[in-house]
Amino acid sequence: MKAVYIAEHGGVDKLLYGELPDPVHEGSEVLVRVRACGVNHVDLWVRQGLPFLRVRLPFILGVDVAGEVVAVGPGARSVEVGTRVMLFPGISCGRCEHCLAGEDNLCPHYELLGKSLPGGYAQLVKIPSQNLIPLPATITWEEAACIPVAFGTAWNMVFEKAGLHPGEWILIHAAGSTVGSAAIQLARLVGANIITTAGSDEKLEKARALGAQYLINYRRQDFLHEVRRITKKRGVDVVIEHIGEEVWERSLLCLATGGRLVTCGATSGYQAKTDLRHVFFRHLQIFGSNSATKAAWFKISRLLQEGKIRPVLDRVLPLTEAQQAHRLLEERTQFGKVVLVPE
Ligand SMILES: [Zn+2]
């Protein structure tokens, strides 16, 4: 099959396009023909290399996959060839205390497609059958590839970790990011007061269309100052962030007493400073969040079918232009997902 892979870690030039062996599915696994694969920030990290991450080279990136089932292992009898699916990218053991408690994203044996297992920058990918999410007929392949990571991550942050309530104030950083644009839509569903940030007015107008009521252009305005002004010095109940260093200290200062900050990334750097006096004197809570539970997907899928949430697609590129896709993410020029489509 044709695939984009890395043979060594490094810059965008390390993304190679070429021929690799087809994946061999067995047991309860299925083989999926990739129709579209979303590009995520984690792809950039895997490409560059992470100190705690060991991947077997050559390695295929790509976490967010949509496609159709083309072959089914003997242990995956309930799945039919030809089914249109999105892939839930987190693969857990199914036996540990976390898995059995329905917290499969906390599984100590957790693996992620495109991070530790070969991903979707390819014509074919294999995955356990329990990781298939049926794709509503109204959603295109390209749209479907915008959904799993963005909405799964945002769901876990906004509802499972922060426990957002109607009428609360929420600050969602980076409206143009896929997690940001998903979090805005989820927060709107419960009637929260949504403040969001972006680096251009054009992005902010798109954020408004998704449901954000208060907009901050972080290139022109200091977001801490603006949050204080908008909330009349009260602060927000929840901050959703994945920028890290650049916004961390001011994000904590944005929180009202008893506020919750949830982080799922650190695109600007991970050595953020925390003044602990704010944490204990003001009863702040800081949550780390990674992926979502499989159970959350039943609800996300329903909302998608009902048209209450929608994928946010920036642009579609052929798989051969994976290098360009990574550059776009590095430059932060996109609003929503950049999606790769194999030939
Ligand atoms: Zn487990």
Image: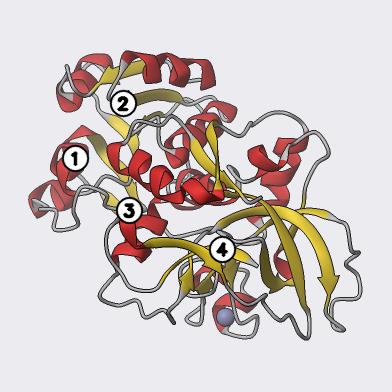
Q: How many angstroms separate mark 4 from mark 3 (CA)?
A: 27 Å
Secondary structure found at label 1: helix
Q: Is residue 182 above or below residue 102?
A: above
Question: What residue lies at 39% left-to-right and 20% top-to-bottom?
Answer: 203
Q: Is residue 168 above or below residue 66?
A: above
> Which amino acid lies under the numbered mark 4 shown in the image of this protein?
Ala
Q: Is residue 58 left or right of residue 240?
A: right
Q: Which mark is residue 247?
A: 1
- Which residue is under mark 3? 265
Q: How many marks?
A: 4
Residue 126 in sight in this render? yes
Q: Which of disc 1 and disc 2 is earlier in sequence?
A: 2
- Which residue is under mark 4? 3
Dot in front, 1 or 4: 4
Asked if ligand 1 lies within 8 A of label 3, the reply is no
> Which amino acid lies under the numbered mark 2 shown in the image of this protein?
Thr
Q: Is residue 174 above or below residue 136?
A: above
Badge 1 density bin: few <14, some 14–19, many ≥20, Cα 10 Å: some
> Could you say where residue 141 lies in the image, as x and y percent from the top left?
70, 42
Dot in front, 4 or 3: 4
- Which residue is under mark 2? 197
